[in-house]
């Protein structure tokens, strides 16, 4: 692990963001060349299309961790306007240079605003600890409109680790089982609409894909 900054608090979140800043958006793209290939979207299009079917045509969409903007481009191609955000300044700068409006937003530390009809976070919550995930789910729930949808993906597995794979800079990963993730969502007062394991990229990288909506409070 190469990150040697202050690790006493929120080390997983801050250490991972530090690595993204060091690598930069161009470095991230160089280490993930498949992202430049439009076919990379093929494995997740079915999931995304089902998610978008739940969003009204004029709905507000917040994307967390937009990175290079690939998923936002696809969502916008269906007529939606996406509020692009990222917790790493390097990605915000990259999207702005591409002519997109984008802002810095840290899911763990910042307020999300809203209400949004959909909050989308592809391969973002996998960098959060269990405690941070609980905080994030609470924030998202409070930012969604009535009937709003949270769609996100994480890596399947068990446990947690730091790895320098692909980028050469340390990133934190928290792995989830389908049962554990479903229990976490139920605890956070969500109704799980869809949760399945599938490919996220042509190279057979696996993800757990989730669609969930806040539970309607029971009337007394």
Image (cartoon, rainbow, N blue to C red):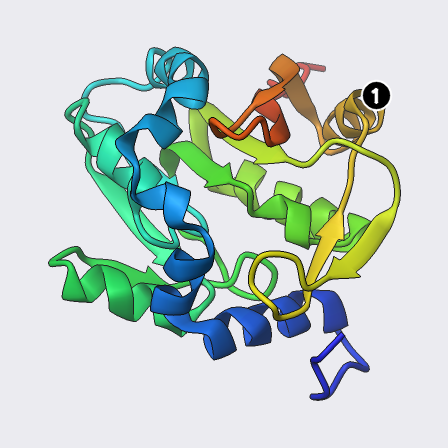
* Residue at horizontal 19 percent and vertical 57 percent from the top: 101
Give the residue drawn at x 83%, y 50%. 160
Foreground residue among 56 and 32 = 32
**Residue 192: x %, y % from top left:** 65, 16
Percent coordinates x, y for residue 211 in the rendering = 55, 20
Q: Is residue 133 left or right of residue 61?
A: right
Where residue 135 appears, x then y in whole percent?
69, 51
Which picture quadrant has residue 137? top right
Where's the C terminus, which quadrant? top right
Q: In the visual, does 42 lie left or right of 6?
A: left
Tell me how many marks there are: 1
**Residue 114 visible in image:** no
Q: Is residue 102 above or below residue 191?
A: below
User: At numbered mark 1, what does the secondary structure look like: helix, strand or loop?
Assistant: helix
Q: Which quadrant is the N terminus positioned in? A: bottom right
Mark 1 closeness class: few <14, some 14–19, many ≥20 residues within 10 Å? few
Image side of residue 25 versus residue 23, left or right: left
| Above or below: residue 63 compared with residue 9 | above
In the picture as drawn, the residue positioned furthest to the right comes out as: 159
Residue 197's quadrant in the figure? top right
For this orientation, the residue located farthest to the bottom is 5
150 displayed left or right of 188: left
Residue 97 visible at all: yes
Q: Nearer the viewer, residue 76 or 142?
A: 76
Q: Which residue is mark 1?
A: 179
- Seen from the viewer's position, the closer of residues 156 and 10 is 156
Q: In the image, is residue 213 above or below residue 152?
A: above
Task: State the residue in front, 161 or 115.
Answer: 161
- Residue at 48 percent across and 30 percent down: it is 201
Q: Residue at (47%, 73%) from the top-left corner?
A: 23
Residue 117: horizontal and vertical position, in percent? 37, 29
């Amino acid at each position: 692990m190469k990150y040697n900054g202050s690790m006493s608090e929120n080390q997983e979140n801050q250490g991972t963001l530090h690595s993204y800043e060091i690598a930069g958006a161009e470095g991230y793209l160089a280490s993930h060349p498949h992202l430049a290939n439009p076919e990379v979207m093929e494995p997740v299009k079915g999931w995304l299309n089902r998610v978008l079917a739940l969003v009204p045509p004029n709905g507000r969409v917040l994307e967390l961790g937009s990175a290079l903007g690939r998923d936002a481009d696809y969502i916008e191609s269906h007529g939606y306007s996406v509020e692009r955000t990222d917790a790493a300044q390097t990605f915000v700068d990259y999207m702005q240079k591409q002519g997109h409006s984008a802002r810095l937003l840290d899911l763990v530390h910042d307020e999300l605003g809203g209400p949004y009809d959909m909050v989308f976070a592809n391969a973002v919550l996998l960098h959060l600890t269990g405690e941070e995930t609980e905080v994030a789910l609470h924030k998202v729930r409070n930012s969604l409109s009535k009937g709003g949808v949270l769609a996100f993906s994480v890596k399947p597995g068990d446990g947690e680790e730091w790895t320098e794979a692909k980028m050469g800079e340390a990133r934190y990963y928290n792995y989830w089982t389908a049962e554990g993730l479903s229990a976490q969502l139920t605890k956070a007062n969500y109704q799980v609409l869809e949760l399945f394991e599938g490919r996220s990229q042509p190279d057979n990288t696996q993800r757990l894909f989730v669609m969930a909506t806040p539970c309607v409070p029971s009337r007394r």
